[in-house]
Image (cartoon, rainbow, N blue to C red):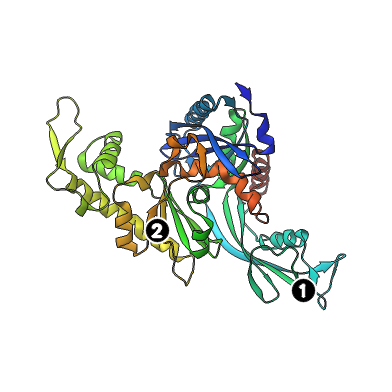
Amino acid sequence: MKSLNRIQDKTINVGIDIGTSRIRCAIAEVNTDSKEIKLLGIGSSPSSGIKQGSIIHRDQIIDEIETAITDAETMAGMKVNHVHLSISGDHIRGINTQGAIAIQKNGHSQMSSEYDISREDVRQVLELAKAISFPVDRDILHILPQEYVIDTMTGIKDPVGMSGRRLEARVHLVTMATSTATNLAGCIEELGLTVEGFVFQGLASTIATVDEDEKELGVAVVNIGAGTTDITVFHDGGVRHTGVIPIGASSITNDIAVMLQIGKEDAEMIKLKYASAKSSMASPELNFDIPVKEGELKRDISEHEVSRYVEARMVELLQLIAREISRADIHESLTYGLVLTGGGAQLKNLTGLAEETLKLRTRIGIPKGVSGAIDIASTAAHSGVVGLVRWPLYYDEKQFSEPTGLTFKTVVNKLSQWFKEFF
């Protein structure tokens, strides 16, 4: 295999999406001129070493990550050495903040005169906006500008070259636990790879599934994973809220397993094959056999009966999602409603239940804007990993948002400082 030398100039992007039930790796080639993305290889592996975003068995997760990477490398015909890594869990926090500066020229404030705004001015106002006192065990994951204000002019997306006396930036900050990032990066480093950056899993899914018009008019992207549900709310082109619910689709699997007294693997199969998010859409007359062990009596159950339990659990999750969306404090309605994505969004009739429960327009978000081997990555479950390979391109387009600079070295330094101060 050839070495992935071109990754340094961002012509090759690699993403690893680490979830509670599966780990996925994608390798894509980016045309920096046309902004087109071609998926070269994709690999996956069952995940058993992580739960709700936190590592519970380090050796297992390293082996599983290696399997996913090897599958993707084999398909792409090349070796990788740099990756972007998804991160989720209830340690993720989002906050809206702002900062303002007087426009300066030659290092001196000139409040009585107007001067052109430079990129340095934008950098300074973003630095001021993120200057919030966080605990030493937390780091800023993303700085996401919502809008800029020049004097009394609001809603500005690109202030460079415009004139004014005062520049204000309104931003959304996403923060994470330093130790979680350190542990994940350490697993990747163990495999001889370098983490170029971490990306909030919910934001990665957004990049793969929604367009600028949806972000402008209002949309909430809900990434339903096995162990967590990530929410990202957009309005006026910017992120207004991010949040993580520590409940995912595995809760439904667990309910089925307990109800039918079967293993989780069989329960997952029944959920995907027979269950419906709306019990009214499942027939009470269609029965299926329940998997039994040798020596046990044969049992069956109707699709409707199973779906009743599934619907009850999904309504609970949707209500939690609605509560999280309400924290965005957006007074206007979300024109494009909900986009449901992630592996948990593959449950039958889920969009109908969501529209009925939340009274919001709903669709399933699948990866788009990618060519190549997309046929094997065209489901909602792959939105996160496809978003990861689009991430560097996304930040090239968003000139004034700053990608996370968190690497294994920086998070280790941060963690070392924390331990010194603590002890």
Q: Is residue 284 above or below residue 300?
A: below
- Tell me where residue 186 appears, x and y as whole percent: 59, 35
Circle nearer the viewer, 1 or 2: 1
The answer to whether any part of residue 183 appears in the image is no
Residue denoted by label 2:
321
Mark 2: few/some/many CA within 10 Å (<14, 14-19, 20+): many
Tell me residue 279's x, y (percent).
21, 52
Sequence order check, earlier mark of 1 and 2: 1
- Outermost residue to the right: 106
Displayed quadrant of residue 185: top right
Q: Is residue 100 above or below residue 7?
A: below
Mark 2 lies on a secondary structure that is: helix
Please name whichever residue, 52 or 208, is drawn nearer the observer in this view of the structure: 208
Q: Quadrant of residue 132?
A: bottom right
Left or right: 231 with respect to 395? left
Circle 1 is placed at which residue position? 165
- The quadrant of the rendering that contains the N terminus is top right
The structure residue drawn at horizontal position 52% and vertical position 24%, both measured from the top left corner, is 74
* Residue 331 in view (yes/no): yes
What's the residue type where badge 1 is placed? Arg
Q: Left or right: where does residue 369 sit relative to residue 314?
A: right
